[in-house]
Each structure stands twice: as C-alpha cells, then as structure tokens.
Image (cartoon, helix red, strand yellow):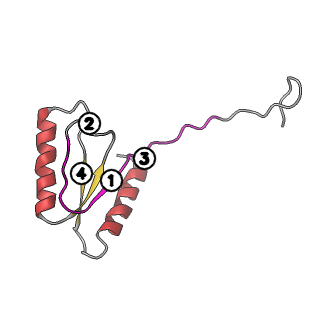
Amino acid sequence: MSTTLKRRLERLERLAGRNKGAGSTATLIEPAADASEEQWHQFAIRKTEAEAAGRVIVAIRYVQPVRPIAYRGRVVFVPPKKPAVIEVRPLQTEGNSYAH
C-alpha cells in the first residue's frame, strides 16, 4: 500500500471515528473480481467482526463487487488512489517551430 493511501486512510478513519474514540474504525479491502473463495471467506469474517464491534467501516473498493455485499452500520467507500498520467507537450507556434 502506498504512503499516500495510508495517510488518506488514517485521515478518513480519524474523521469517521472522531466521536467514538480510538479503535472505532475498521479498514476493509473488498475482494477483486477474480478473488478466490478463500479470499471472500476471509473478507466476510473481517466484515462480521467489524460490524459486531460497532465500528465504522472504511471500505476500499477497486471495482464493483461481483457478489453483493450488504454492510450493516456506517460505511465510507474509498477508491484506491492511483497517480494521474500527465502528458506534457511543447506548445506549437505558427509553422513547425515550438514556443519557448
């Protein structure tokens, strides 16, 4: 997990659990489209534990899940932060020369 994503998750967890104190949030990464049965099982266990503890769930969602996921309680969905692709080109002036 990148440093930027970790900082962003920490900030969201603080905001989501501001009134409930430390340990009031749980971060879950939803299984990918090609996830195995074991990965779905582990996710279900972690989700159930977080719901039973009454925590606010911060769910990282890469794509729309293949199976429907029903959350109980407060949930904050976060897309993974991907660096943007920036293309830089020189500006053209009249003719074939480029601006400086």
- Residue at the (35%, 52%) spot, across then down: 78
Describe residue 8's horizontal placement relative to residue 83 as left or right: left
Residue 7 picture location, percent across and down: 39, 58
Tag 3's secondary structure?
Answer: loop
Q: Which residue is mark 2?
A: 32
Q: Which mark is residue 81?
A: 3
Residue 52 picture location, percent across and down: 10, 62
- Is disc 3 in contact with disc 2, using a CB cutoff of under 8 Å? no
Q: Which residue is mark 1?
A: 77
**Which portion, as a residue range, is magenta?**
68-87
- Up-down: is 86 above or below 97? below
- Of labels 1 and 4, earlier in sequence is 4
Badge 2, how many Cα within 10 Å: few under 14, some, many 20+?
A: some
> What distance separates the C-alpha of mark 1 from that of mark 4?
10 Å
- Of labels 2 and 1, earlier in sequence is 2
Q: Which residue is mark 4?
A: 28
Residue 10 picture location, percent across and down: 35, 61
> What distance separates the C-alpha of mark 2 from that of mark 4?
12 Å
- Up-down: is 37 above or below 10? above
> What distance separates the C-alpha of mark 2 from that of mark 1?
15 Å
Residue kind at label 3, given as amino acid type: Lys
Describe residue 75's horizontal placement relative to residue 85 as left or right: left
